[in-house]
Amino acid sequence: RGTHKYSGIVEDCCCDYETVDQLNEEVLYPSLQELVKTPFFRYFKVKLWCDCPFWPDDGMCRLRDCSVCECPDSEFPELFKKPRRLSLDDLICQEGKPQAAVDRTLDRKAFRGWTEIDNPWTSDDETDNDELTYVNLQLNPERYTGYTGPSARRIWDAVYSENCPKYPSEESCQEEKILYKLISGLHSSISIHIAADYLLDEATNMWGQNLTLMYDRVLKYPDRVRNLYFTFLFVLRAVTKAGEYLEQAEYDTGNPNEDLKTQSLMRQLPYNPKLQAACPVPFDEAKLWKGQSGPELKQKIQQQFRNISAIMDCVGCEKCRLWGKLQVLGLGTALKILFTVDGQENGVQTLQLQRNEVIALMNLLNRLSESVKFVHEMGPTAESITEGR
Ligand code: FAD
């Protein structure tokens, strides 16, 4: 264990790497770990079967509730309409394997009361209750599932090349770069979770850390690490900005003791004195959407993000789809908090969030916090064991 090589201010943010690592380890990580175990935060309502609007069924969705997709071809880019033919050997999705399966647990009690409000940043529709299932996130850790090959690659390619420029050029404006960094940061976090909980030996079902994989997919590319820290601070800023709303929200699930704990954690987290002292504004959103083209640009980026959200329905492995949808909804919620609400002092008072958005937001923050901790603690070891390979 050691300190990694990143130092200075996290690009486009307001705090430095050391402060982020310290705050994460002392304050954020322990609180978030507790929070995501509470009944309110451990159940996520999600439409899990594949109604991928972009590609015809590629044989990945073999589960009972993965129906063949009808693909309307009006609104989608050319790339999506002409899928490359995949051979059966390419389909390395391991849907049938236990590590990819989703454990569903019904706890309808955990869902009461909250309003159903549209989120302009995402394509999820929560009102269609018949099609939604409740998933216990604690029973479904994000980890290696064996989902790989052209199906997975196609998703990432679509997310990057269709929706945000892969290598933002000098001319691409700051706002577009931010969308790219958010996606790249999330991608890093997913890769880190795969590496942190990897199936090392299929025969003996041995799980453990795969530090070489973490190096090859993330650490070798400093930008990917920087984007992870950026995304963490961006989402943290959304949580602190919505602090008042989150503090007053109802966390009633019918478990008085547990709900009290949830309430108290949600009261403390955004206002934690150490956080307030060391990094009061983790990201400054007030700088964005300025200038003449501001409103148009915002709409354009909103549409791009909605596309990314819709692409998550095409993820061919159910558990990956679960975490993909949750985390993209979490990012969409962060964007909604930071940009839909106007920049006025009292703007947050007009904020309305769905229960699922709050669950996604806090679970995303927790995932990012886990990734930052893993990079901080295991990064130097991963780098040293890969040297001289
Ligand atoms: P990929 O991770 O597929 O990356 C594709 C390409 O994107 C890379 O070659 C590189 O050019 C670029 N790239 C990679 N990382 C970054 C970054 N951080 N920033 C910018 N560009 C980057 N697999 C699991 O085992 N468990 C899961 O829970 C899981 N969840 C997934 C969720 C989603 C939404 C998706 C799309 C995939 C998921 N996968 C999951 C699959 C996993 O992400 C990889 O696609 C797979 O492991 C194959 O990895 P790869 O090495 O081919 O590169």
Image (cartoon, rainbow, N blue to C red):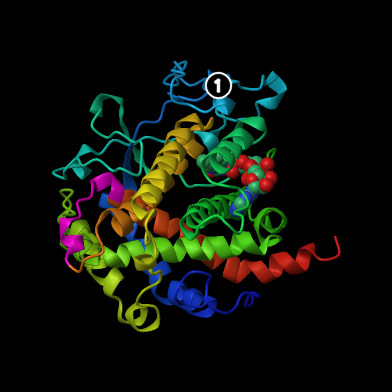
Quarter of the image with the C terminus is bottom right
Which residue is situated farthest in the right direction here?
Answer: 388
Type of the residue with mark 1: Lys
Residue 200 visible in image: no
Q: Is residue 220 magenta?
A: no
How packed mark 1 is, by other alpha carbons closer than 10 Å (few <14, some 14-19, many 20 or more), is some
| Residue at point 41%, 21% (across, down) | 65
Residue at left offset 56%, top offset 25%: 78
The location of residue 255, given as percent across then percent down, is 18, 52
Q: Quadrant of the N terminus?
A: bottom right
Residue depicted at x 65% and y 57%? 218
Residue 220 visible at all: yes
Q: Position of residue 134 (x, y in %)?
A: 31, 36
Residue 105 sits above or below residue 297 on the image:
above
Q: Which residue is mark 1?
A: 81
Towards the viewer: 150 or 305: 305
- Nearest the viewer among 287 and 115 is 287
Side of 174 relative to 359 (left or right): right
Residue 213 versus residue 223 in the image, above or below = above
| Quadrant of the rendered image containing residue 114 | top left
> What range of the chain is rendered magenta?
346-357
Query: For the point 28% across and 35% down, which residue is it?
Result: 106
